[in-house]
Image: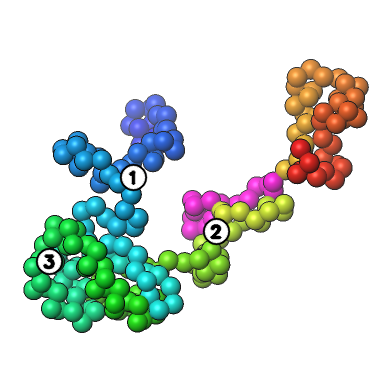
Amino acid sequence: DLLLKRQSGRGALLEACMFDTAISLLTAAMPAYFLEGVAPRGIGNRHTMAAPWNSFRCADGWAIICAGNDPTWNRLCEAIGRRDLLSDPLYATQESRVRNVVSLEAEITAWTARRSVERVEALMDEQGIPCGSILSLEQVLDHPQFATRGLLRDCGVLKIAGAVFHRNGAPLPVLAGACDLGAGNHLLARRFGLSDAEITCLLAEGVLVDPKEKVDATAA
């Protein structure tokens, strides 16, 4: 990297692959497996070691609420007007809340179901409780931050999600749009040693596609 190059005069090869990235998401599951031999099971949006931590139904959608420690749990009970839950032995500790997560979530859902997602988020934010709405694709595309961050790129043929990297506060520029089907056929054929006559023959036989002609991509 640049720091190593500055210090030693030599650079470094930085690698990242999708498999390694996926493994890094097992941070919470791996210690339990190696220490206790417990393999994780599907639990949806719940957390294996904290509760309440899940998506909760609201009057007009869904919101995720995460109370990962005792202070946050105390503030959550205050926010929903259920301080009585603090003295309930079923929810006295983090471990007991995880064990009794079904009944605990029912108590919270009874509160969220009577309020809008926006109201739930506002009340959680006032108490410093991690919370966020679950957006539909339409809501994501209509979100003001989506446009502000330049996360949609028009490549001509189609629209795609933009790069997550920004340089000097701006999204990376689109250097070129998506290529038409067969756009590199002539170049590749010549690199494989085919003559113009052979390429013309392959085009006539339909082996190669001429990007200048309108092609039905679903016919292949």
At horizontal 65% and vertical 56% (from top left) the residue drawn is: 159
Q: Which circle's residue, 2 or 1, is located before the other in the chain?
A: 1
Give the image location of residue 23, x and y in percent. 35, 39
- Identify the disc placed on residue 151: 2
Q: Is residue 201 above or below residue 130?
A: above
Q: Which residues are magenta?
A: 163-178
Circle 3 packing at 10 Å, graded few (<14), some (14-19), many (20+), is: some
Kind of residue at badge 1: Leu
Q: Pointers 2 and 3 in contact (CB under 8 A)?
A: no
Which of pointers 2 and 3 indicates the residue nearer the eye?
3
Q: Which residue is mark 1?
A: 25
Magenta segment includes 73: no
> Where, quadrant-wise, is the C terminus in this rendering?
top right
Look at label 2 and name its amino acid: Leu
- Residue 41: x %, y % from top left: 30, 46
Kind of residue indicated by mark 3? Leu
Whole-angstrom CA distance, mark 2 to mark 1, is 24 Å
Instruction: Judge left or right: residue 157 versus residue 195.
Output: left
Residue, disc 3: 90
* Residue 130 in view, yes or no: no
Q: Main secondary structure of the magenta part?
A: loop
State left or right for residue 92 relative to residue 208. Answer: left
Q: Quadrant of the N terminus?
A: top left
Q: Is residue 5 left or right of residue 108?
A: right
